[in-house]
Amino acid sequence: MGDGRIHIGTAERRHRLALRQRLAGSSRAGSPEEVAGSLVALHGTDPATVHLAVGARLADAAKTVSGTERALYEDRSLVRMHGMRHTVFVFPTELTAVVHASTGLTVAAKERATLLKNMAEAGAPDAAWLTAVEESTLAALARRGQATAAELGRDEPRLKERFVYAPGKSYEGVHTVSTRLLKVLGVEGKVVRGRPLGSWTSSQFRWAPAPPHPELDPAEAQAELLRRWLAACGPATEDDLKWWTGWRVTEVRRALAAVDAEAVSLDEGTGYVVAGDAGPVAGPAEPWAALLPALDPTAMGWRQRDWYLAPELRPMLFDRSGNVGPTVWWNGRVVGGWAQRTDGEIVWRVLDGAGTGGEGIGREAEAAIAAEAERLASWVGATRVTPRFRTPLERELSA
């Protein structure tokens, strides 16, 4: 390039994705901890996503459920907590302090202020009262180890207090202190989501005390989080980084400078990699296919997605809020979607326009995708999985 920057093209970005996102067969991981460490964070808004994302990347997919539950609820080597963009993720427990300082503190302050404002507008008790309830609730949770909101309400009856949210507005509603306060405590890094009440697909869960962690300098924590993410997902544009982290652009630029990120040229413009990572990366030794779940961290990893997802495929694969549904991948790009029918069958479809030059993806690709569908069905078994955010293709295939 004229400016001296190394150019990283689409083919090489797909090579990096295959290897660093643990998707090519030869790069699959040995444990859920290895998957989460490679990806930095797994989307946890939909509980099923965590297991499905892990299973797609494990060398032995049969260990998906037992291994993930062990990591989350027994060894506590993974933790489900609020993180970037006020979203629930699953992180390696070692990253708890980094996530809390880099993204949680700012969001938490706004969340608590909003709760106090809403309570004051409704004539509910004041901040001192809320602090007393909070301290009592955390003490009860420490005694129990894990507890549902209902169980905590029996220990601390003031959690059942109700107040009117947005009185007089078209969206007026009644909120319970427990719902709002536990959410605030989650964002503040004081509690995390524990074992679900049902199976691994259940969205009803217990709360647990957050693992202890040191208080880090926010700027240093942001630099560390960005460094880890660039190592897993670089190259990425400034816009990608701002979107993924939820930070202000000034924070992104400060973190890029702190880690001495190297600027490279992309088809979209300027991108960044960690220092020393601009050189060519050899691709996987074999072609590969993958069936990734709704909200998978690879499909949602970048804001600018044309290098792995053709714009004409998006209307069928995303909901109206921008949440991606289940996707089918072939050699580093999205070619279609999949779903599970009520009888348990895993069905998939390659979308028109997924091929190059108007042709289909070929028999080798279709055979590999079919094998991945069988692999997925083998460990999901009798469990039925319906994404929390339904997309047009998923609805159509599952009907």
Image (cartoon, helix red, strand yellow):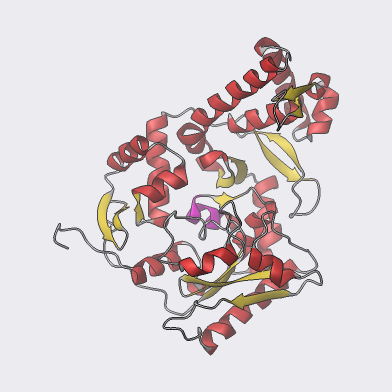
Q: Where is residue 390 in the image (x, y as percent from the top left)?
A: 68, 59
| Quarter the N terminus occupies | bottom left
Give x and y (percent) for residue 75: 65, 46
Q: Does the magenta stretch include residue 38?
A: yes
Inspect this view and state whether residue 94 appears. yes
The magenta region covers 33-40
Nearer the observer, 106 or 318: 318
Q: Is residue 227 left or right of residue 30?
A: left
Give the prevailing secondary structure in the magenta stretch.
helix
* Quarter residue 142 falls in: top right
Residue 223 in magenta?
no
Work out which residue is located at the far right of the displayed protein and give it. Answer: 154
Residue 56 seen in the current view: no
Please tell me whether residue 352 is drawn above or below residue 81 in the rendered image.
below
Identity of the residue drawn at 42% across and 78% down: 285
Q: Which residue is drawn at 46% across and 75% down?
A: 331
Q: Which residue is drawn at 31% across and 43% down?
A: 256
Q: In the rendered image of this protein, does residue 206 appear above or below residue 261?
A: above
* Residue 345, image quadrant: bottom right
Q: Quick one: quadrant of the C terminus?
A: bottom right
Q: Can you say whether 364 is above or below 143 in the image?
A: below
Q: Where is residue 363 in the image (x, y as percent from the top left)?
A: 54, 89
User: Where is residue 2 drawn, in percent x and y?
Assistant: 13, 61
Q: Residue at x 68, y 11 (%)?
A: 126
How many numbered tags mark residues here? 0
